[in-house]
Amino acid sequence: MVDLVHDARTATRAPATLRARIEAERGRRRGVRLRPAFGGALVAGLAAIVLTLVLVLPAGTPGAPSVSQAAALALRGSVAPAPAADPADPIDKLGCSVGQVYFPNWASTLGCRAVGQRVDQVNGRLAITVYYEWRGRQIAYTVLAAPALSQPRAPISRIKGTQLRTLRRNGRNGRLVVTWRRPGHTCVLSGAGVSASELQKLAAWTPAGT
């Protein structure tokens, strides 16, 4: 870190006397207290380094996207046609997935038809959103690639072995969001004008016989 600060100071073409003093400081033991002027520059340099680290830390840290940010992707709307049914399992799956997490084909089982999709990058993570029409309303199903996001503070329910967290964005009349995890990925189901029990039912859905 001392070397980084030194390089930064020399890049600004500091006076020769100051550069000589910095070279002398570098030769001392690491535990020696630095002079006030150089110490101030070191603190500033360390602050910049720490900020950079915070911005690139993995899930669960300030640098990772939040579930709320993931849910906000749905508001951008679809930009491509809905994925077709998976030829290998057309009844239960769409031909679209993030890692091992596939998007369900709810058309025949729940009357919920896929109508569009979009692909985004959130802090370097792949995020795919598939839009469905269900009972005259549109809901969005977003899957963000691993590592999983931090769990939000929200009421927890468990349905069919799946732990769900339910929250609402932007107050009482905002968009309802249900989130859960599957194989290290984060799943987010959201919609307006739908009840928590309806979204939870969709989130906990599993193919017949599973």
Image (tube, rainbow, N blue to C red):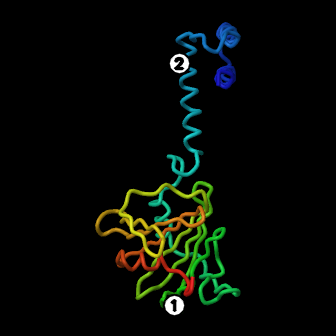
Image spot of residue 99 (x, y percent): 66, 68
Image spot of residue 157 (x, y percent): 39, 68
User: Would you place residue 107 above or below residue 126 in this image?
Assistant: below
Query: As drawn, which residue projects farthest toward the bottom?
Result: 108
SS for callout 1: helix
Is residue 207 found left or right of 159 in the rendered image? Answer: right
User: Between disc 1 and disc 2, whose residue precedes?
Assistant: 2
Residue, x 51% and y 47% (percent of image)?
61
The quadrant in which residue 125 appears is bottom right
Mark 2 highlights which residue? 40
User: CA gap, disc 1 to disc 2?
Assistant: 65 Å
Image spot of residue 203 (x, y percent): 47, 75
Mark 1 highlights which residue? 109
Task: Identify which amino acid the numbered label 1 is placed on.
Answer: Thr
Mark 1 vs mark 2: give the one in front: 1
Residue, x 58% and y 39% (percent of image)?
52
Image spot of residue 62 (x, y percent): 50, 46
In the rendering, which numbered label is found on residue 176?
A: none
The N terminus lies in quadrant: top right
Task: Identify which amino acid the numbered label 2 is placed on.
Answer: Gly
Residue, x 46% and y 64% (percent of image)?
72
Tell me whether the residue at label 1 lies in contact with that at label 2, contact meaning CB atoms closer than 8 angstroms.
no
Q: How crowded is mark 1: few (under 14 residues within 10 Å), some or many (20 or more)?
A: few
Residue, x 61% and y 71% (percent of image)?
101
Q: How crowded is mark 2: few (under 14 residues within 10 Å), some or many (20 or more)?
A: few
Q: Please state which of residues 6 and 190 is positioned toward the viewer in this rendering.
A: 190
The C terminus lies in quadrant: bottom right
The quadrant in which residue 135 appears is bottom left
